[in-house]
Image (tube, rainbow, N blue to C red):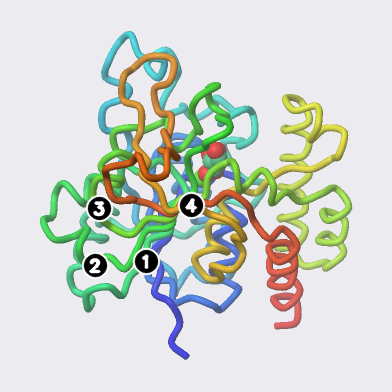
Amino acid sequence: MTKPKLILDVDTGSDDAVALALAMLGGEAELLGITTVNGNLELKLTTDNTLRVVDLCGMGDRVPVYPGCAYPLVSTLNPHSAQSLRPIPKREGSGTGQFGMHSDHLPLPATALAPQKTSAVVWMIETVMAAPPGTITIVALGPLTNLATAMRAQPGFAERLQRIVLMGGGDATGNETAAAEFNIWTDPEAAEILLQSGVPITMIPLDATHQAFLSAAQAEEIEAIGTPLARFVAALLRDRIAGYAKRDPEMAAKKIAPLHDALALCYALHPGCIRRSVEAVCHVDLGGGAAYGRTVLDRRANMVQEKPNCTFALEPDRAFFCDWLIGILRRAAKH
Ligand code: BDR
Ligand code: CA
């Protein structure tokens, strides 16, 4: 069976790092390349962190990394927007990343690997336009600036994609604000460009990822696999459990944390890992107020005039997801 051809668009980032490692070592996909974007940290850092993970996985000669957009399209331009009050992209030395969850540098040695000179946007366009139509899936795990820019720059780019699987959005909850999830909030206009593009999109929002948590006991299980990669994943998971404990009493009590981006990758390879989803019309609030960046999911059934523009995941098969993730780390230990 031919493997799905994937491009991973990331803002590494601790959960991006886990997704990247699973994509590279799981052997389930043909990974054409990795593109990086401003998000959890500034572009220089998300690119450096991505290269460190590629190095850890021993894939430096096989998986090229292309740096993309260093700023969101619009959201930081308005001096009165919430985004403009924050240091976006976050500067080296800020040491916190989103919610203190993503330190500037992942706990991995510095790498001699270098990023490609071609911009992520140019490479994505060339790669997608050169491939047979409908053969490439983009798994987007950060703000959607690179993808939206490619769509605006190259007529026919969107139509040529097989689909986009993205981690982002939330119906019942936000995380960066009460209304908005971080990836969408960082570049709301980019997300809306995607949602108007006509590309088949699956959104893996907070509603799904918060239910696909891993526990402190699973961090121990992962640590016991004993490889540098497994120890790295266990350390990230523990950090995230500590980070979530500070802001969510329920997660604190259960000693759990989500690894959002890894669930989106899992879905791209195993759609069955989402048990319940809705085909729906979804748009992003671009009003610039308290709901700026919110994904507004229209659930009014027969009252909706517009055709659904996405599949919005609501409930994961958590057991499948955890077994898949730990299974890849165990298999990688045998090679
Ligand atoms: C998303 O925001 C980032 O911090 C994570 O890497 C994930 O992609 C979760 O809201
Ligand atoms: Ca991310």
Mark 1 to mark 3 CA distance (whole Å)? 15 Å
Which residue: 25% across, 61% down? 123
- Residue at image mark 2: 128
Left or right: residue 331 versus residue 158 is right
How far across and down, in percent of the image, does residue 110 sit? 57, 51
How packed mark 3 is, by other alpha carbons closer than 10 Å (few <14, some 14-19, many 20 or more), is many
How far across and down, in percent of the image, does residue 202 sit? 43, 55
Tell me the element at label 1: strand
Which residue: 35% across, 14% down? 81
Indicate the amino acid at tag 3.
Val
Indicate the amino acid at tag 4.
Val
Instruction: Tell me which label, 1 or 3, sits earlier in the chain.
Output: 3
Q: Which mark's residue is nearer the viewer, 1 or 3?
A: 1
Instruction: Tell me which label, 4 or 1, sits earlier in the chain.
Output: 1
- Residue at image mark 4: 278
Residue 121 bears which disc, if any?
3
